[in-house]
Each structure stands twice: as structure tokens, then as C-alpha cells.
Image (tube, grey):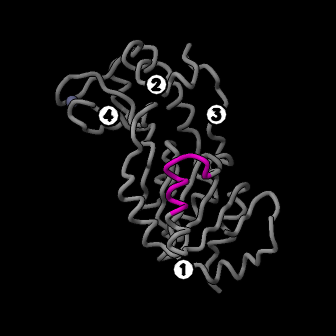
């Protein structure tokens, strides 16, 4: 595994690595660290009376939906000010497929077409009865928005504590067929990203881990071949 971070942990020739990396057969696996240079996540500990850890719990949305949605609207407005940084942009420009743990939607904003959002997306709402997804605009129409189809209360589009991650089968399929796994801004400590890294390793793929300063290293790694 190659690691690029605050310093190079070993003598890595980034130019040589960039030349070797086959963009068509590379997958990026990203976490919170890639969005730091975009100012996310914001450091708010309590929003509209809701501590952030409770914001991600199902019972908060079930038992205190108006308060939960008030917090949701505030966070949505805050996050809307964030824009993709050079790391998101470089991945999009290189047309590298992205598997992300982030719910900020910045990979899509950067123009990435193939993105798996394992934890869902803050800008979507979900009906648990219909299993349908709606744009977040519905939160401006009612204090607690309801499903346009069935009328049930909507829930946020990101996963809540205890939920399974989304699209994991497709993520496994992508990684199992890749020769390069570029891990950006995640410690690989938690499942399922830890498992995805193991799959890449078993396959003998090159794992390139950018542990810090993604906005510097990702563009260097994905610079156009010369
Ligand atoms: Zn519904």
C-alpha cells in the first residue's frame, strides 16, 4: 500500500505512480477527509436543540420530527454553501468511479457520474413505506414533510444508526474488478470500507491511501498522463 498524507510516509515517486495508474480500472473510496477543504463537516455540536449524534438516530425522527426537520433545514442551508474542492474535481475530471461514505453530495456537484453513496445523501428524503426517494425541496413546504405518493412522514435520505449501508453489493462488484483502489480521507477502520480494502488487497490490486491533504495529493496523482 502506498500512503500519501501530511508527509510521504515512504519515498513514493508520485509522478511514476500517476503514470502507472490506469484510470479506467481504478475506483476511489472516499470519506470525510476529502471534504475538509470544502469546510465540511461543520463543527456544530447542537443544531436546533438536537445534538448531532441524535440527528442520525431513527427515534429522533420518529419522536421529534418537527425538531429533527428544523435541524435538517439549518444543516441543509449550511452545507449548500460548500463547494467541491480540487480533490473532488480531479476525480470527476479523470472520470474515476467513486464509492463514498459522505452524505454531502460534493462528488455529484463536481460532475462525477458514477457515484455510490454508501450512507445516502443529505439532499434527499425517503419514504419508508414506498421506499421512494424525493428531493429535499419538500422540507420547505411543511414543517414535517410527507410522501407525495402515500402521505406517510418522510425521513432523511441518509442512513440512520443501525441501518444497513446502501448499494454494498455494487460497491463490492466494482472493487473486486479494479486494479487500483484510491482511498481518500478515511481511516479504513470501519466496515464496510475496511472490507472493501480487504477485497482489493486479496485481488492484488494496488491500494493508494491518501490519509490527509486530499486537495493536494489527489490532483497530483490524477494529473493527465505525460
Ligand atoms: Zn410513500
| Residue occupied by mark 1 | 22
| Residue occupied by mark 4 | 126
Q: What is the spatial separation of the Cα atoms under label 1 and label 4, in whole angstroms?
A: 37 Å
Q: Earlier in the sequence, mark 4 or mark 3?
A: 3
x and y, in percent, of residue 217 in the image: 70, 64
Q: Is residue 67 above or below residue 146?
A: above
Q: Earlier in the sequence, mark 1 or mark 2?
A: 1
Q: What is the spatial separation of the Cα atoms under label 3 and label 2, in whole angstroms?
A: 19 Å
Quarter occupied by residue 20: bottom right
Q: Which residues are magenta?
A: 188-198
Say what secondary structure mark 4 lies in.
strand
Q: Decide which of 10, 37 is in the foreground and name it.
A: 10
x and y, in percent, of residue 45 in the image: 64, 23
Q: Nearer the viewer, mark 3 or mark 2?
A: 2
Q: Is residue 196 magenta?
A: yes
| Residue occupied by mark 3 | 42
Q: Earlier in the sequence, mark 1 or mark 4?
A: 1
Left or right of 206: which side holds 162?
Answer: left
Q: What is the spatial separation of the Cα atoms under label 4 and label 2, in whole angstroms?
A: 15 Å
Determine which of the numbered discs, if any, sits on residue 94 in the image: none
Amino acid at each position: 500500500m502506498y500512503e500519501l498524507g501530511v508527509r510521504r510516509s515512504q519515498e513514493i515517486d508520485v509522478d511514476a505512480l500517476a503514470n502507472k495508474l490506469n484510470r479506467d480500472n481504478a475506483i476511489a473510496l472516499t470519506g470525510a477527509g476529502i471534504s475538509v477543504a470544502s469546510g465540511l463537516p461543520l463543527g456544530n455540536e447542537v443544531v436546533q436543540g438536537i445534538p448531532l449524534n441524535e440527528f442520525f438516530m431513527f427515534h429522533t425522527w420518529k419522536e421529534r420530527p418537527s425538531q429533527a426537520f428544523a435541524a435538517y433545514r439549518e444543516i441543509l442551508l449550511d452545507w449548500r454553501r460548500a463547494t467541491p474542492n480540487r480533490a473532488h474535481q480531479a476525480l470527476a475530471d479523470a472520470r474515476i468511479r467513486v464509492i463514498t461514505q459522505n452524505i454531502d453530495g460534493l462528488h455529484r456537484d463536481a460532475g462525477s457520474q458514477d457515484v455510490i453513496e454508501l450512507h445516502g445523501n443529505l439532499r434527499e428524503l425517503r419514504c419508508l413505506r414506498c421506499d421512494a426517494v424525493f428531493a429535499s425541496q419538500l422540507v420547505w413546504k411543511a414543517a414535517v414533510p410527507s410522501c407525495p405518493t402515500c402521505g406517510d412522514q418522510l425521513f432523511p435520505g441518509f442512513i440512520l444508526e443501525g441501518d444497513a449501508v446502501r448499494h454494498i453489493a455494487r460497491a463490492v462488484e466494482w472493487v473486486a474488478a479494479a486494479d487500483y483502489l484510491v482511498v481518500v480521507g478515511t481511516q479504513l477502520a470501519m466496515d464496510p470500507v475496511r472490507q472493501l480494502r480487504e477485497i482489493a488487497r486479496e485481488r492484488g490490486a494496488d491500494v493508494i491511501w491518501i490519509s490527509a491533504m486530499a486537495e493536494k495529493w489527489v490532483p497530483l496523482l490524477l494529473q493527465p498522463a505525460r
